[in-house]
Amino acid sequence: MLPQSHITYTLAAVDLLQDKLPALKNVDYRLVALAATGPDLIDKPLAALYFYRKYKSAVLFAHTLLAHLAVLLVVIWKRPAWGLYGLVFNGHAILDRLWLFHDTWYWPFRGWRFHVWGKRGSEQADIKLAYWYAFTRRPELWGWELGGLLAGVWFVWRNRLYHWPNLKHLLLTGRLPRRAGS
């Protein structure tokens, strides 16, 4: 899944939950967006710097069960107020359906040798072409991205972010503008 879809699905879900859970009223949507892409923000630079040459993958250590459990435990024990952001970080695993890629997700529980993401036609010599190859060879991925686009459009529409003052408020404060009736 592309980063913008991780972000839009998550923003839309948090926005819906915010209506039901008053504890989420002070959520910072900028941090939600960062947490939604957290594993990619860790693994993509690592891949670009070194690991892509070795593994031909940019889905590495931050996409493992071990990393997700570590984030959850640190949040629970050290920063309980960041609970939502820890859950959002872990939501990345759900959107990527990481449990389907046993050799990456369960590392190191299946042995110390690191096994990368199950390759399905996106591997090539150049990391910059990874998404291009994946999306031109696997059109089933387009549905997830279309869903992310629709979630983003819905989020913008619901919060009237097409009005500059509303968008500016979100960007500067991380908070959504108040909706009429709330």
Image (cartoon, rainbow, N blue to C red):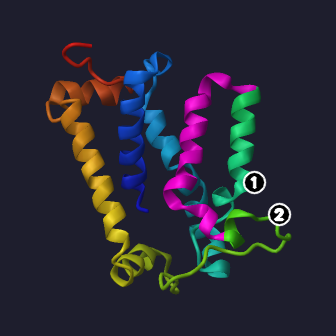
Query: Residue 56 appears at what percent x and percent y?
Result: 59, 80
Q: Which mark is residue 109?
A: 2
Whether residue 87 sits left or right of residue 111 in the image: it is left
Q: Which residues are magenta?
A: 78-101
Whether residue 31 sits left or right of residue 52 in the image: it is left
Q: Is residue 22 visible?
A: yes
Q: Which residue is under mark 1?
A: 66
Tell me the residue at 57%/44% (across/down): 89
Compare residues 177 and 15 and report the one nearer the observer: 15
N-terminal-most mark, 2 or 1: 1
Q: Which mark is residue 96?
A: none
Tell me the residue at 43%/62% (across/down): 1
Q: Residue furthest left?
A: 163
Tell me the residue at 83%/63% (across/down): 109
Whether residue 99 sits left or right of residue 133 in the image: it is right
Give, as a three-letter code, the residue at label 2. Phe
Compare residues 58 and 19 and report the one nearer the observer: 19
Question: Gap in Å between the C-alphas at discs 2 and 1?
Answer: 8 Å
